[in-house]
Amino acid sequence: MSHLLHRSVNGAYPVAVGGKGVMLFDAEGKSYIDASGGAAVSCLGHGHPDIVAAMHAQIDKLAYAHTSFFTSEPAEELAEHLIARAPKGLSTVFICSSGSEAIEACLKLARHYFIEKGESRRTNFISRRQSYHGITVGALSVGGRMKDRAPFKEMLLTGHHIAPCYAYRDQRTDETPEQYGLRVADELEAKILELGADTVAAFVAETVVGATLGAATPAPGYFKRIREICDRHGVLLILDEVMCGMGRTGTLHACEQEGIAPDLMAIAKGLGAGYAPIGAMLVAGKIVAAIRQGSGAFPHSQTYNGHPLACATALAVQKVIERDDLLANVRLQGAHLERRLKERFGNHHHVGDVRGRGHFWGIELVADRASKTPFEASLKLNARIKQAAMARGLMVYPMGGTADGVSGDHVLLAPPFIADAAVMDTIVERLGEAVDAAI
Ligand code: PLP
């Protein structure tokens, strides 16, 4: 009997004992293609010798130094590397250990910024329904998946939610993708006006929605309009690129493809590629300037901020991605994966939509294609697909649909950036078999 509190206390999990490239191995000797990078984490695959070497080199020098006493070379170098490639206007990096912490830091810094500016009435956060931003109380408060929130509702901060940008289900037949994008973006302005513009601190959204909607890409022009609305009302734009960022969609930041830059951005997962737990918040220069002119400090620090080993690891990951031009591979093999997915599932009776970008793809499963009716939640289709895929040596990331604002079960794919065409072909072949076996 395990003494670990597993995700399911009744669950039995294979024991992972090794990994090489796109493969993971369990203690029974079974191998799995890691087609989801865990949960869109392992973007370099497993056992990358250059990352392992960089970790050894750093741990031989210095594993840890508390940030109230010291800064460290890896933390400074990582910040410099990230800012040199950051969306316009972002100047400074806060380094923590996970995506939830990065989001929590964004929320608190947004609030702190307005206190520094003397706009302390700005306490409201607006986010989107059917969204996931992490597990901590602040992150859960902006999260929009009601079943996650319900057990903790008395503990949550006030959160205000608008519709997600989810064309498959919500775009009307009489509107173009652009018209749809503007219509849903305008819900933000209506919500800001309803709450009172001088009470709103920030709007939080994932650029491409991962876990909750399965790689749902924004409609053209959606984020440009969101940016305009935020600017018009002095509201900060927080982008959650924990899952979709750091190259996952074919550009380093997903927002590059939307032609906008946020005021605060959360990154994690692909930043350290799973070799070390690390997340970060990227901060606009205007926010740092307000702190500089105000109290001089952001009162939010943690024991493991800027952890030297984690920073050296993430820096090595980012340098390998750049050195090996892996984002070019993401674009090339992402297009191949898209073709294969559309061939295999484009006419499948129970696949309503195939969507995504780069190495970030989702298929949405439906009981009936014409009416888009989702499968009953009680069928636990997501768990069955996961099991059927594991039995075939494939790791994918299936998720149940949401009842609050309907969505179907979906399967998320997030293969490592090193995956080639043959790996993509095997992923699609095994996924097809797993879906057919599970339904
Ligand atoms: N934000 C998004 C979009 C995520 O997908 C996740 C995790 O899946 C998080 C935040 C939370 O990150 P973490 O699990 O590292 O705390």
Image (cartoon, grey):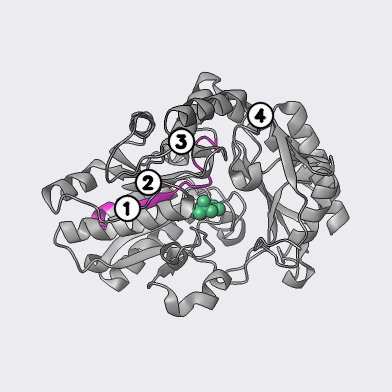
User: Marks 3/4: CA distance?
Assistant: 31 Å
Quarter of the image with the N terminus in it: bottom right
- The residue pinned by badge 1 equals 301
Quadrant of residue 198 in the image?
bottom left
Residue at the extreme left: 293
Q: Which amino acid does label 4 sit on?
A: Gln
Query: What is the distance, in whole Å, between disc 1 and disc 2 at their CAs?
Result: 7 Å
What element does badge 1 sit on? loop
Q: Which amino acid does label 3 sit on?
A: Leu
The answer to whether 328 is drawn above or below residue 258 in the figure is: above
Rendering coords of residue 305 (x, y %) = 37, 46
> Number of callouts in the render?
4
Q: Which of marks 2 and 4 is nearer the N terminus?
A: 2
The three-letter amino acid code for the residue at tag 1 is Ser
Magenta part of the protein: which range?
231-249
Q: 10 Å neighbourhood of mark 4: few (<14), some, or many (≥20)?
A: many
Classify mark 2: helix, strand or loop: loop
| Residue highlighted by disc 4 | 333
* Front position among marks 4 and 1: 1
Asked if disc 1 and disc 2 are in contact, CB closer than 8 Å, the reply is yes
In this rendering, does residue 298 appear at all?
yes
Image point (33%, 32%), residue name: 76
Q: Name the residue under label 3.
A: 309
Q: Does the residue labelled 1 lie within 8 Å of ligand 1?
A: no
